[in-house]
Amino acid sequence: MSELEQRSLFRCGFVAIVGRPNVGKSTLLNRLVGQKISIVSSKAQTTRHRVTGILTTNLAQFVFVDTPGFQTRYRNALNRAMNRTVSQALADVDLVFFVVEAGRFGDEDRKVLSVLPEDARVVLVINKTDQLADKSQLLPFIDKLRGLRDFVEIVPVSAERGKNCTVLIDATVFLLPAGAPLFEEDEVTDRSERFLAAEFLREKLFRLLGDELPYGIAVEIECFETEGQLRRIHAAIIVDKAAHKSIVIGKGGDKLKRVSSEARVELEKLFDGKVFLEVWVKVRSGWADDERALKSLGYE
């Protein structure tokens, strides 16, 4: 088959987006699929699950797997589950987007790079180029990283501003294997509405509680019902200690009300319909180090 014929074939493949916490993996995923499906926060460990996003072009279908940042600091069951998620994602993908922050490459980045399979085809994605104070430092930074591995492509981007994201897709489309699409053209994720509701609520907790946010916090959807265009959602915010409950609720319930209200607004945009959202807080001591509790909350 000639190169011209090879390039005319439709392509479809799985692409893992990996990197240390807080390099912008979720922002990149949302930008590439053109819709918010993965939650974003300036705090580390925002993404705890494997989130799949789908981009279909006239040439290919990219099935992106947004993974948690690989955890090197904590050793509880939650972090072990997050690291397993990363390892599982790497085991069955066609391509890896290894995301780093422009001008910054440290030990945590090296550790993530070291767990990538030797035979994996890795694209180095240098994110946050818009935040680089001295733009003349970008080329020397690229040269410094070039020797760390045989990257199949190196693409500087700004996921936040959308800069070079189209270039990233164009540069990698022919690295995907030939094959028919796995999803419909208009699908952007394979995650359920129930899962997305929990994630969007968790994002509001990260954003609105700020530094007060307890580490041991999770969201459990206890009831999700659809009545035409109306969705009734009952959600429990799980905290590790009784003292954390008052932090989440706030004075007179103001913080919990704001979290619920802002999550409902975003969910109505996402689902394109009315949402009735009822949220309360439960104490479940030691959940982040309890394998059974983690499974009930959707962690593998």
Image (spheres, grey):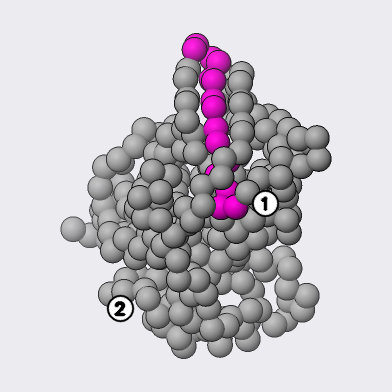
Q: Which residue is mark 1?
A: 243
What span is colored magenta in the figure?
A: 227-241
**Residue in view at x 46 percent, y 80 percent:** 111
Q: Is residue 230 magenta?
A: yes
Residue found farthest to the left: 1
**Residue in view at x 71 percent, y 40 percent:** 249
Give coordinates of residue 157: x percent, y percent: 61, 64
Name the mark on residue 118: 2
Quarter containing the N terminus: bottom left
In-image side of 256 versus 8 (left or right):
right
Q: Nearer the viewer, mark 1 or mark 2?
A: 1
- Evaluate whether residue 153 shows in this view: no
Q: Quadrant of residue 212?
A: bottom right
Question: Main structural element of the magenta stretch: helix, strand or loop?
Answer: strand
Q: Nearer the viewer, residue 253 or 202?
A: 253
Mark 2 and mark 1 in contact (Cβ < 8 Å)? Answer: no
Question: Would you place residue 228 above or below residue 219 in this image?
Answer: above
Secondary structure at numbered mark 2: loop
Q: 10 Å neighbourhood of mark 1: few (<14), some, or many (≥20)?
A: few
- Evaluate whether residue 291 shows in this view: yes
Q: Quadrant of residue 150?
A: bottom left
Q: Amino acid type of disc 2?
A: Glu
**Residue in view at x 76 percent, y 42 percent:** 250
Q: Nearer the viewer, residue 194 or 246?
A: 246
Q: Nearer the viewer, residue 189 or 135?
A: 189
Question: Would you place residue 31 above or below residue 182 in this image?
Answer: below
Q: Nearer the viewer, residue 37 or 201?
A: 201
Q: Across the whole image, how many numbered discs are drawn on residues?
A: 2
Give coordinates of residue 100: x percent, y percent: 56, 71
Name the mark on residue 227: none
Q: CA distance from mark 1 to mark 2?
A: 46 Å
Q: Amino acid type of disc 1?
A: Ala
